[in-house]
Image (cartoon, rainbow, N blue to C red):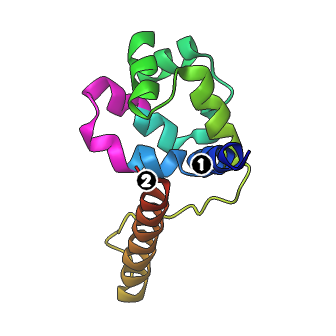
Amino acid sequence: MSREISSDSSQEQALRIVLARVRGLISSFTPSEQAVAQLVLDSPQEVIYLSVDALAKRADVSTTSVIRFCQSLGFIGFKDFKISLTSELGRPVAVLSTEVRDSDSPFEIAKKVFQADMQAIADTLELLMSGL
């Protein structure tokens, strides 16, 4: 019985870190998988409403690449990935504007760097806690 509870806890934890996992693994993906990953990171709210074919078309890759992307993240397929992504989007997600511009003041630059570092630390903690 306690085994089932532990399993559910692990599953819930995995659901919370989909985007962190994508960010953490993006450099290890194939170019096609990276195109899917970037689209997921840029527009996660749109991705949850797309079919596998529509996502492949929007990322300019094959449907096989989308499925491989999902499997690279540890999901059985696209449906499982979308369910987890949808669950994650139910919690607040910090949107960071980390692009430094010429017009940014030193304070704005420092703030953007700090926010990006904090997000990286939070993502790393989530990944470590999940055992990934």
Camera-nearest residue between 128 and 122:
128
Identify which residue is drawn at 45% across, 18% down: 67
Residue 26 inside the magenta-drawn segment: yes
Q: Which residue is mark 1?
A: 10
Callout 2 amino acid: Gly
The image quadrant where one finds the N terminus is top right
> Dominant secondary structure of the magenta stretch?
helix
Residue 62 shows in the view = no
Identify which residue is drawn at 50% across, 37% down: 40
Residue 55 inside the magenta-drawn segment: no
Q: Which mark is residue 131?
A: 2
Callout 1 amino acid: Ser
Which residue sits furthest front? 1
Decide: is 108 above or below 132: below
Whole-number angstrom distance, CA of label 2 to CA of label 1 = 9 Å
Q: Which mark is residue 87?
A: none
Residue 94 point in image, percent of width and height: 59, 63
Please report the bounds of the magenta region as a residue range: 24-36
Labelled pair 2, 1 in contact (Cβ < 8 Å): yes
Which residue sits furthest bottom? 107
Q: Is residue 56 left or right of residue 78?
A: left
Tag 2 secondary structure: loop
Residue 104 point in image, percent of width and height: 39, 77
Decide: is 53 above or below 114: above
Q: How many marks?
A: 2
Task: Name the image quarter holding residue 49.
Answer: top right
